[in-house]
Image: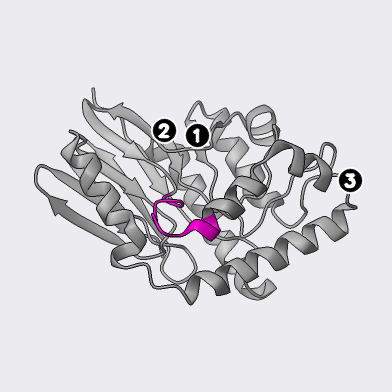
Amino acid sequence: MDKRYLFISDQHLGLQTKEIEDKKERKLVAFLKFAEENCDELFMLGDLFDYWFEYKRVYQKGYFRTLTALQDVSEKGIKIHYFIGNHDFLHKDFFTKEIGAQVYYDSIDIKLNNKSFFIGHGDGLVKKDYGYKVLKAVLRNKFTQWLYTWIHPDIGVALASNASKSSREYTKKKNYGELDGMLEAAKQKIDQGFDYVIFGHSHERAFLNYKNGRYINLGSWIEAPCYGKFDSNGFEIVDWS
């Protein structure tokens, strides 16, 4: 019997005003309750938070409902695949130990219902964006992260928030070409034999056929929340209102 899979990406919790964030988080929690009854595995493709910096004994307040809802999904026996996005400054073991999620730092290839999937956040695929590649290497460096943990959480989280917003402004000014290089990367993967390539990151929703495969981008929850659904009927993108 085919399994049911759900996919979401780029919620960026913490980006906007408290009023907007409260509404967005309630929509997300409602979706997670929906996922409890309507999927066997959940894929979260990165940037759940607009910034996340996890200390050894401290985690950011303001997301209690989301974290609790994720734990409820996991306790229902649903496997959570959690991808680290470019706004996830530092994850340690909270999502694995407390929630029970499988955490990925890079794209993966996986078989779902006998179809071949290549899945990831999608960042780092722009060949000429050397500045971002250097920044990513620094932010993911274990020694750099260890040094950062010595900063008081109130200051560290504030710095992470400001860095996230600066990164967004930097990205807006760039013109990388067609879907920031992700479509090109997707075509290459389909040429290698993948049936589906799924990314987030660009905030540009896409569902494109290429040869015998499909490139899918889940957009973001900032303006138009949606989710991907894959089961015996194939793949579709569904609005979540």
Q: Secondary structure at mark 3?
A: loop
Q: CA distance from mark 3 to mark 2?
A: 36 Å
Q: Position of residue 201 (x, y in %)?
A: 44, 57
Q: CA distance from mark 1 to mark 3?
A: 30 Å
The residue at which mark 2 appears reads as 41
Q: Are marks 2 and 1 in contact (CB under 8 Å)?
A: yes
The amino acid type, in three-letter code, at marker 3 is Trp
Q: Is residue 206 above or below residue 73?
A: below
Q: Is residue 165 left or right of residue 179?
A: right
Q: Which mark is residue 150?
A: 3
Quadrant into which the N terminus falls: top left
Mark 2 neighbour class, 10 Å CA radius: few under 14, some 14 to 19, many 20 or more: some
Image quadrant in which you'd find residue 35 = top left
Q: Which residue is drawn at the image coordinates 56% and 32% (left, top)?
A: 101
Q: Which residue is drawn at the image coordinates 15% and 43% (left, top)?
A: 213
Extent of the magenta region: 122-132
Closer to the N terminus: mark 1 or mark 3?
A: 1
